[in-house]
Image: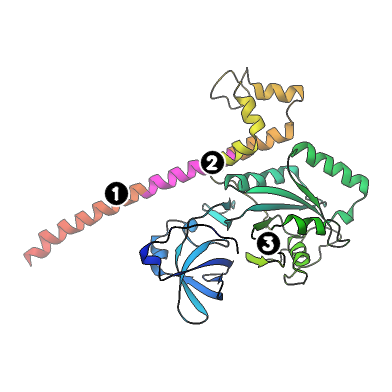
Amino acid sequence: MNKIDFEITEAEEDFSTARVIAEYKGVYKVKNLAGEYLARITGKQMFDALSREDYPAVGDWVAISMADKENAVIQKVLPRKTIIKRKSSNKTEAQIIATNIDLAFVIESVGRDFSLNRFERYFTIANSGGVEAAIILNKVDLISHEELDTILSQIKNRFKDTKVIVTSTVTEEGLNELNEFIEKGQTYCFLGSSGVGKSSLINKLLGKNLLRTEDISAHSVRGKHVTTKREMYFLENGGIVVDNPGMREVGMTDVNVGINNFFDEIISLAGGCKYKDCTHTQESGCVVLSAIKSGKLDKDKYSNYVNLKKEAEFYEMTELEKKEKDRQFGKFIKKAKKDLSDYGHKDYGKQ
């Protein structure tokens, strides 16, 4: 497993370091040089946790103590080098997809759900967490060479400097290239919707059908959601890959930095706008809007940028509101404790 340097305190010297390789409901699987163990967190960790981000996640390095030969206790989550997280539309908290990832493979198949905008959405959450991303265009056996060339042209026009690997688990096209791209000791996360072929690709990389898969409907071209947990797998070449459940939605969290980095072309143009607070939607003297009209800037890319920016700003706004509510509730508890103390002093002291 790849290493990350940590400072170990004197109190932690009796613990050993392991990596979280799978996450189940209320329990984790951790791995170190001695073996694999089922592990739980301490009650103190649960009590101190302010959000789901304070809990262990697949990819985390953790300090553990042994409960017995098969079970361990996670005492502490060690600092994360990178993190990939998203927000679901029906949840307020961010959900961690994986941590300490070196590169994210964003996978789409050439079926009906192919979307350049979705690539940008995944790239944004990866970039915001400090993770580089590459594209895997899968199931290319389903289309003609001419159709493939058209799609590749669209991808390369929108993502000029991004690595693109074309694959098919049926014809095994691109599998050698993908395997050679994965380096020893590096951790890779597979991101994509249900049915794009993440698990099938990992099975090919493993050389065995370890992950359960199902064929998609030829009529609907929709994949069935098969992977139900996040899990890490170790390849013969020393690379490490993380499979994830298919994601129908990839909501934005606090990713403004990632948006600005990924859409740097728009950010660069924005510097020339007439107004510093230009929203790039209707203002006169907006260089970004001028670039769209002249064809210098891709209209779809701009539209996606605006949507992602709005989502990120809404998330940050709701987070600030939540913190303010927590602060107000904390003041209420403090006052209530004082009132109870005064009540006890005045009344119970008379009995």
- The residues bearing labels 1 and 2 have C-alpha atoms spaced at a distance of 26 Å
- The residues bearing labels 2 and 3 have C-alpha atoms spaced at a distance of 37 Å
| 24 magenta-colored | no
Q: Give the mark nearer the N terminus: 2 vs 3.
A: 3
Q: Residue at horizontal 36%, vertical 66%?
A: 11
- Please provide the residue range marked out in magenta: 310-326
Q: Main secondary structure of the magenta part?
A: helix
- Disc number at residue 314? 2
- Disc number at residue 239? 3
- 218 relative position to 190: left or right: right
Classify mark 3: helix, strand or loop.
loop
Task: Tell me where residue 35 appears, x and y as whole percent.
Answer: 57, 76
- 205 relative position to 314: left or right: right
Does residue 104 appear in this view?
yes
Q: Residue at horizontal 29%, vertical 54%?
A: 333
Does residue 281 appear in this view?
no
**Residue positioned most to the left:** 350
Name the front one of labels 1 and 3. Answer: 3
**Residue positioned most to the bottom:** 69
Residue 243 location, quadrant: bottom right
- The amino acid beneath tag 1 is Lys
